[in-house]
Amino acid sequence: MSKIILTGDRPTGRLHIGHYVGSLRRRVELQNSGEYDKTYIMIADAQALTDNVDNPDKVRENIIEVALDYLACGLDPSKATLFIQSQISELCELTFYYMNLVTVSRLQRNPTVKAEIQLRNFEASIPVGFFCYPISQAADITFCKATTVPVGEDQLPMIEQTKEIVHKFNSIYAPDKPVLVDPQALIPEAEACKRLPGTDGKAKMSKSLGNCIYLADTADEIRTKVMGMYTDPLHLQVSDPGHLEGNTVFIYLDAFARDEHFERYLPEYANLDELKAHYTRGGLGDVKVKKFLNSVIQEELEPIRNRRTEFAKDIPEIYNILKKGSDAAREVAGQTLSEVKQAMRIDYFEDSEMIKAQSERYAE
Ligand code: ATP
Ligand code: MG
């Protein structure tokens, strides 16, 4: 069986370091590993519209921002198909058919959707489209028969929902020869990368919460954000013992710092364990740790920012890449949709056997 990657992001803002450690960094490695037959990367504009219904220009303007972030991080259009969700109308058809396979109560149980409803204050006025987006995400994942979905931890309930749809579809419509492929989520191994918190210490760095360090931030913006980060409210004096749990600066170091960073920027410690030990013992100030984190993040983001500036010199070319990718994705989606319709017994005009049998029956 082919090994196929599908993943994507909502164009609700520029991409941030949570995306980077949660999914983007991994995607680029997988793309370059040579182990996958195909890589599809989707800009999920239709999904973004489910909770930005009155702000289409925000979604429209952010397509290019997300595409630039992709290219800057090393996603390569010669190896990966970069496309825009709304341009693949087949996805709507797949979603419509998958809706019959999911109950309202099952959607209500989805913990990520529950948290997002609360965050957006939807309460009783949840748009139906938003409520159903896990189903449309199943269409996104299955149209290309994805086997591997590199995502952050918040996406696990979506992959679970997709698996249920795949199993139900295959068992009802294609019991002998499965049509849809069961996908596997690929979440980061490091705890800190599964759901990177915001600079304010909130549970998740998220475009919608405005607590992000963006890949496109300038060196000054990064420095200001890092120096203002949430740490340990009990660590008032340098001599006080510090706490690591919920300490955003140390969580970011878990996600980014490597031993060679210590050699370069903080040679009095050999590694992160030594730094943590000193902090918890007392006698190590937040400012020193933040300065170190700033150096580490600057080193990681500078080349990305420079590549982004280069790509931004030819915006029409970026749209060409997305158009080409969308055309290619559409072709694959058309193929899957026809298999789906055949399995669902709604391929009337292609079924000459049926037409013949019915003619014979009426001729008798
Ligand atoms: P929005 O607030 O519009 O939902 P977002 O910041 O949550 O935006 P998405 O486009 O929803 O970003 O997420 C895209 C991908 O990035 C998903 O795979 C998601 O799991 C991952 N991701 C997003 N935020 C984080 C984070 N803070 N830590 C790790 N992974 C993340
Ligand atoms: Mg999100």
Image (cartoon, rainbow, N blue to C red):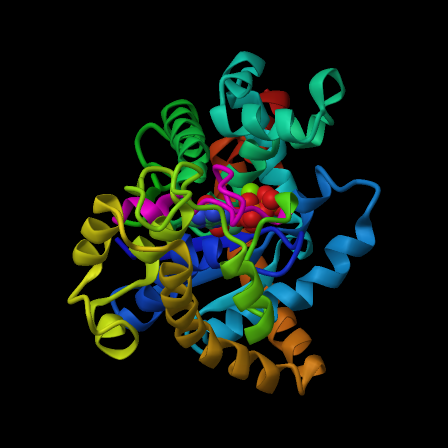
Where is residue 213? Give x, y as percent. 54, 59
Q: Please tell me which residue is depicted at 38% across the width and 43% down the height of the picture.
A: 247
Picture residue at 71% right of the left edge, 37% below the top: 51
In the image, is residue 39 above or below residue 59? below
Does residue 138 sit above or below 85 in this rendering?
above
Total numbered circles: 0
Residue 193 covered by magenta stretch: yes
Residue 350 lies in what quarter of the image? top right
Quadrant in which ligand 2 is drawn: top right
Is 345 placed left or right of 231 in the picture?
right
Q: Is residue 16 visible?
A: no
Q: Nearer the viewer, residue 239 or 345?
A: 239
Residue 191 horizontal/vertical position (percent): 29, 44
Q: Say if the magenta span includes residue 302.
A: no
Residue 222: horizontal and vertical position, in percent?
54, 66
Q: Nearer the viewer, residue 212 or 320?
A: 212
Q: Quadrant of residue 291?
A: bottom left
For the record, the magenta segment spans: 189-207
Quadrant location of the C terminus?
top right
The answer to whether residue 198 is left or right of residue 187 is right
Left or right of 207? Residue 240 is left
* Chief SS of the magenta region: loop
The residue located at (67%, 52%) in the rendering is 12
Q: Residue at coordinates 70% horizontally, 80% vertically from top-left?
A: 315
> Would residue 145 be found to the left or right of residue 340 on screen?
left
Q: Residue 114: x, y in percent?
A: 56, 23
**On screen, residue 280 above or below 228:** above
